[in-house]
Amino acid sequence: MKSNVLGDLSIEDFLANYWQKKPLVIRNAFPDFEMPFTAEELAGLTLETDAPARMIIEHGLPPENKPWQVKLAPFEDSDFTTLPDTHCTFLVNDLERYIPELGNLIEPFRFIPDWRIDDLMVSYAEDQGTVGPHTDDYDVFLIQGEGKRRWKIITREDYPKELIPDLPIALLKEFEADEEWLLEPGDMLYLPPNMPHYGIAEGACFTFSVGFQAPRTVDLIQNWLETFTKNNQFTKRFTDAKREPQENPGEISATDLNKLSSLMLDSIEQQKAELNLFLGKHLTESKGEIPPENHEIIAGYHEQYDYERESWLRFAFIKNQANNSLDFFADGHHVNLPKEYLKDIQELCENYYYSSESLKELMKNNQFNHIFEKLIQQGGLYPANS
Ligand code: SIN
Ligand code: CO
């Protein structure tokens, strides 16, 4: 299979040899790249919305004059007018939520499933601007927008891991690169997780990052546990009808330990089907942020309208092998559907625009209809051209 951003490399080749393994530079991955906004417009966006943003200034400003000063949004006009002319970077996360057209920079990476994609970030740097030498614990595609940036990376595993102490950001104390590239507009660098990198602007430049998420076990388990009180799971108690006399009252015997751990582990095993549903809901849930108001909410479904989906609204589906059906998830909601809906659901998940015709069959299903209405009310779906 081909992707339009991997050059001559097939998706199979990229997944087998680079994804999570090796860095890769693709020259001209986005030919004729055109910047969708100016630095002033980007600054304006952070003044007008809640978009998560930060400034990183290598040689700090008075009165602190500290190296590596970090300022977090919300910003005021004066934060921008007092920025130095060099060695500073301004970064905005979740950009696709605030400028939906920028979904087109994420689209080419959807050979990796949507649930794995985190966000689109942009950085605007003045000459020599950098966020410093660091590692990220996620995969990232760095797409060079306007201007040039020199990227240096360390590929060997035994590099010095010590961080510069007492900084507001985690930066490596030593950084001896073993590869480097100057990226020009439209060029792209893929970096696997935890690979040290250091990008320095040569003249003012914009860099876009498509970042991926990899849930941590502790977060999955914690979130899963939080659903229990609601669902009344795991209420089975320990029993010991076959108890034998024991020598010392203080001992927790091997038999008891085995029974206790089996009680826990077997119960988890029995929850396997439930666990799949939890994962579908959890992975489509927005991360607690308030969605941006990109469109007016027009409540109620109108069957003559086409609908569009906001890029923050995550859809996913699971082919439910256990009961030969389909589970559809949308922003933490779930509906079980007959497998005959597979094609409709696949199209729903793949696209962001739905013709009135394409929604007809699905909307006949009461449960789906209910969720669709709810998502309209939440602003995640809206009539096209509204
Ligand atoms: C940047 O765009 O300046 C930083 C991106 C990164 O290093 O992950
Ligand atoms: Co990074």
Image (spheres, helix red, strand yellow):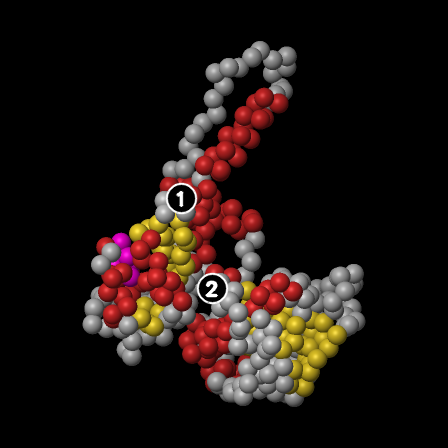
Q: Position of residue 321 (x, y in %)?
A: 41, 47
Toward which corner of the image does residue 161 lie, by quadrant? bottom right
Secondary structure under tag 1 reads loop
| Circle 1 residues within 10 Å: few <14, some 14–19, many ≥20 | few
User: As drawn, is 157 to the left or to the right of 336?
Assistant: right
Q: Residue at x 41, y 54 (%)?
A: 318
Secondary structure under tag 2 reads helix
Toward which corner of the image does residue 170 lie, by quadrant? bottom right
Q: Position of residue 94 (x, y in %)?
A: 48, 70
Q: Is residue 99 magenta?
A: no
Q: Residue at x 40, y 49 (%)?
A: 320
- Does residue 75 lie above or below 319 as drawn? below
Determine if residue 330 is in view: yes
Q: Quadrant of the C terminus?
A: bottom left
Q: Residue furthest front?
A: 1
Q: Which mark is residue 99?
A: none
- How many labels, in total? 2
Residue type at mark 1: give it.
Answer: Ala
Q: Which residue is mark 1?
A: 322
Q: Which residues are magenta?
A: 367-372
Badge 2 vs badge 1, beta-carbon distance below 8 Å: no
Q: Position of residue 384 (x, y in %)?
A: 29, 76
Q: Which residue is mark 2?
A: 114
